[in-house]
Each structure stands twice: as C-alpha cells, then as structure tokens.
Image (tube, rainbow, N blue to C red):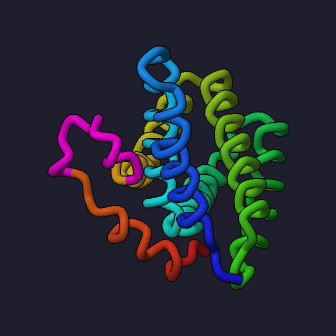
Amino acid sequence: MVNKSANTFDAAARSLRTTVTPALGESNSLAAEQVRVIAGVLDFYRDRAHHEYPRKLYEFRTYLALAERLSGYREVDHDARSLLVDALEAARTTDRLAVPEYGLLDRATDELTRAIAGIVRSARTTDPALGVEVSRVVLDQSRPLVEMQRSWFLPQGVDPDPAAVPPLRSLLGTAATSRVR
C-alpha cells in the first residue's frame, strides 16, 4: 500500500490556511497565529514523511551500537546489566528482520535507551571513574544522533551553524543498508 502521509499533511495544512484562517478573521489574532504554527508543523512533517522510517531505523541502529559498546562494562550492578542483556537480545532479533515494523523499532529503541540509562546510572553509583568513562562513551557514540537530529530539524531555522549540518539524505541513506552486528 502506498504511503499517503505527505498528501494528508498537505491537505490538512491547506485546509487550515484556506478555510480556518479566513473564518477566524481579524478578531482572533491569537487563534490565527496558532493555526499558522500548526500548519507549519504539518508542512514540516509533510516534507519529512518519506524520511520517517529511515530516521527510526537510524536511531535504532545507533542505540544498538551504543548498547553493544556498553555491554563490555561488567562492573555495573546486576539489574542494570540484566536489563541491557535483555534489550540487546530483543534488539538483535529486531535487527535481523528484513524490514522491522514501526512499532517494533519503537519498542526496541525504547528498551535500548532505558537499558543504556540504567548502565549510566549504575556506573556512576558503582565507581565515579567508571561513571565518567561510561558517560564519555555515551557522549562519543551519541554524536551521530545529534548530527541526524540537527539535520532533521534544520528546516526549523534554529541551528546556530546551518552550513555545518550534513544533508539528511546523506545521513539516512546508509541507515537502510548498514547493519550493526
């Protein structure tokens, strides 16, 4: 089935601009401003709709790589380690699928991020030096996510250095074909 999300977002934004805004008239400027903002959000998602799945996959695989990296830290408490092992097992199963569904990607990513946070908390309480080391690993491994998020939100016009932001397509183009093992 063809994804019609972009058409839906476009139709909704157009309806707000051509029907709702004129109906508000000049008397309700706050409501008109809100309609403008909502229409802008719909435009943003219309333009990003075809990148949504590759973005989810990119985030999932980046968190999977980070979790894999953190799995070598055995000094953390048993509960945090157990949560990471379980999250990694589920994520690896998801990653082996030819085309994991949205919900599965979301659940696996949520489990990974929860497990990663548990490892960070545990490392900080186990040993401050270990906490610093684990935090550095997380920061270093998070750079690709930050770059992707900067690129994702670039059309919003708030990035302090837009010329330094790589094109979204160049970041997500590899997400569909690369696999973390």
Q: Is residue 170 magenta?
A: no
Position of 33 with respect to 84 (left or right) is left
Q: Considering depth in this image, is 2 or 17 the residue closer to the camera?
A: 17
* Residue at 51%, 82% in the rendered image: 177
Q: Where does the N terminus fall, quadrant-wise?
A: bottom right
Q: Quadrant of residue 66?
A: bottom right
Q: Position of residue 92 (x, y in %)?
A: 73, 69
Q: With 148 as the anchor, is 102 left or right in this view? A: right
Q: Which residues are magenta?
A: 152-164
Rendered location of residue 28, percent (x, y): 49, 16
Q: Quadrant of the C terminus?
A: bottom right
Q: Relative to the observer, which residue lies in front, 159 or 76? A: 159
**Residue at horizontal 53 percent and vertical 32 percent from the top:** 23
Q: x%, y% of residue 171?
A: 37, 66
Horizontally, residue 118 falls left or right of residue 164, namely right
Vertical placement of 135 versus 176: above or below? above
